[in-house]
């Protein structure tokens, strides 16, 4: 039996993907897709170095995500919800050592507040347990 999304919404079901509004999925997916491709594809890495603005324009990112990528702000990307496995490879790509990567995430929470979305979203005050 096929059920269209309108019917699902009328019956009280929530969309599977979180949405910033009912017409556009949250950008976190696109931020993670960008970083995943950057981590794996040498052509994307070259464009990252040579034409960052052109490369960013190809992805449906929020301004916070664009600014975090431009400034290599691993802490903000973490707070925005980027998966740690993807972020770990990005940190290595931009030259962050392991301990600096971990500290960047801690600093991100101190500066920007708890993780806002994704797998690591905090449900507490953001203070370490």
Image (cartoon, helix red, strand yellow):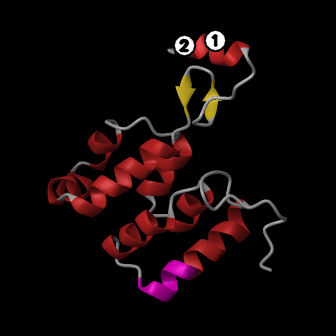
Q: Is residue 109 left or right of residue 125?
A: left
Instruction: Give the answer, above or below, for where 104 lies relative to 120.
Output: below
Q: Residue 48 appears at what percent x and percent y?
A: 26, 55
> Which of 97/40 is in front?
40
- Which residue is denoted by mark 1 in the rendering? 7
In this rendering, the answer to whether 16 lies above or below 106 is above
Q: Assess whether residue 103 is covered by the magenta stretch.
A: no
**Which quadrant is the C terminus positioned in?**
bottom right
Which x, y percent locates residue 13? 70, 25
Q: Position of residue 110 (x, y in %)?
A: 72, 70
Gap between marks 2 and 1, in whole Å? 5 Å
| Residue visible at 58% across and 55% down in the picture | 81
Label 1 sits on a secondary structure element that is: helix
Q: Relative to 74, is 124 on the left or the right?
A: right
Q: Is 5 located above or below residue 29 in the figure?
A: above
Q: Residue at x 62, y 60 (%)?
A: 79
**How many numbered badges does the structure rendering display?**
2
Badge 2 vs badge 1, beta-carbon distance below 8 Å: yes
Residue found 63% across the figure and 68% down from its top: 108
Q: Please report the bounds of the magenta region as a residue range.
A: 97-102
Which residue, given by chain and number where applicable, does mark 2 sit on? Answer: 4
Please identify the quarter of the rendering in which residue 89 is found: bottom left
């Amino acid at each position: 039996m096929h059920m269209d999304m309108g019917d699902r919404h009328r019956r009280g079901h929530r969309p599977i993907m979180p949405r910033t509004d009912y017409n556009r999925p949250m950008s976190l997916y696109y931020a993670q897709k960008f970083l995943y491709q950057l981590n794996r594809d040498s052509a994307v890495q070259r464009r990252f170095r040579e034409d960052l603005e052109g490369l960013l324009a190809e992805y449906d990112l929020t301004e916070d995500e664009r600014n975090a990528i431009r400034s290599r702000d691993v802490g903000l990307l973490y707070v925005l919800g980027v998966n740690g496995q993807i972020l770990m490879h990005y940190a290595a790509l931009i030259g962050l050592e392991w301990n600096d990567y971990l500290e960047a995430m801690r600093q991100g929470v101190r500066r920007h507040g708890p993780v806002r979305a994704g797998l690591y979203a905090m449900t507490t005050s953001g203070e370490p347990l």
